[in-house]
Image (cartoon, helix red, strand yellow):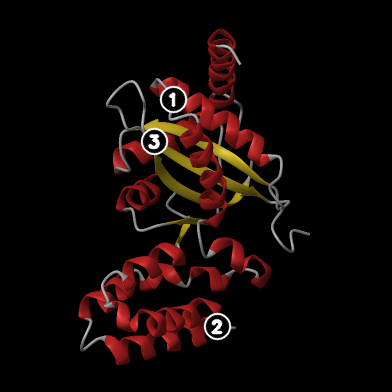
Amino acid sequence: MSATNISRLTKIWEKKYEGWQDRDLSIKEYIYFWVDGIYFNVRLSSDRPCLLVIIGALADGTKEMVSIYDGERESKLSWKTVLQHLKSKGLKKGPKVSVGDGSLGFWAALEEEIPGCEQQRCWVHKTADILDKMPKSVQVDAKSMIHDMYMSPTKEEGIKAMDRFISLYEAKYPKACRCLKKDEGQLFTFYDYPAQHWQHIRTTNPIESTFATIRHRSRQTKGCGSRIATLSMVFKLSISAELHWRKLRGSQ
């Protein structure tokens, strides 16, 4: 495609993104949120925007993109701005559970803006954080024990698996065990919800899998030339990906 056509399409996507940001959310009722901050490089400047992303699941099990917000970093103030924007567009009720990594900015903002929402830490991120504090020689066994925590048939069994891990490793690897215990109250929230949904809400996989493809496209184009072009491209690719998302298991 010619540079002229690419510029024309980018302008169209910018307008569509602006219209999408201003859409009415008053009829939306989300039950789950998945959240993350995704960093992108801008080819023609030193900017490295952090796009604050929220994917939501509606009561009928449909997943959809809720927010792609241009931020500087994953701070409490940035996430507060995102949540306040959603409320200003008519979102009356927050989700039952929000799923994300240990970024303190979002959780602090969530407690102020949607105080009734429960928190679920992503087990993929938590596993990586724990193993990073252990030598490679024990990581295979340690990962298997962590796997038992979130794949147990009940919450009680999952907590017992965590206790076994701490009993075995706390003396030699206290930092790894402190990392695990730090989010204990938010790691097992998913067990309180329908078993069909557990695989959906114990990780941020809906965001990770979508943005793996978007990052690939960004690399192929060697990055966008401006901040707004980056935002527009991510928006367009996300909305295209949304068409292929599957509903939650057991949505009926």
- For marks 1 and 3 on the same chain, the one whose residue lies earlier in the sequence: 3
- Residue identifier under label 1: 224
Image quarter for residue 122? bottom left
**Where is 157 relative to 133, above or below?**
below
Residue 152 tag number: 2
Marks 2 and 3 close (CB-CB < 8 Å): no
Residue 226 in view, yes or no: yes
* Nearer to the camera, 5 or 121: 5
Asked which secondary structure carries label 2, the reply is loop
Marks 1 and 3 close (CB-CB < 8 Å): yes
Asked which secondary structure carries label 3, the reply is loop
Q: Locate residue 187, reporting x and y percent.
A: 43, 70
What amino acid is found at the position of numbered circle 3 in the picture?
Phe
**Where is 36 relative to 201, above or below?**
above
Q: CA distance from mark 1 to mark 2?
A: 44 Å
Q: Residue at x 46, y 36 (%)?
A: 219
Name the quadrant of the C terminus. bottom right
Q: Residues within 10 Å of mark 1 (few under 14, many from 20)?
A: many
- For marks 1 and 2 on the same chain, the one whose residue lies earlier in the sequence: 2
- Residue identifier under label 3: 40
Q: Locate residue 204, reporting x and y percent.
A: 50, 56
What amino acid is found at the position of numbered circle 1 in the picture?
Cys
Asked which secondary structure carries label 1, the reply is loop
Residue 73 is left or right of residue 242, and the answer is: left
- State which mark lies toward you, 2 or 3: 3
Q: Locate residue 240, reporting x and y percent.
A: 66, 35
Q: CA distance from mark 1 to mark 3?
A: 9 Å
What amino acid is found at the position of numbered circle 2 in the picture?
Ser
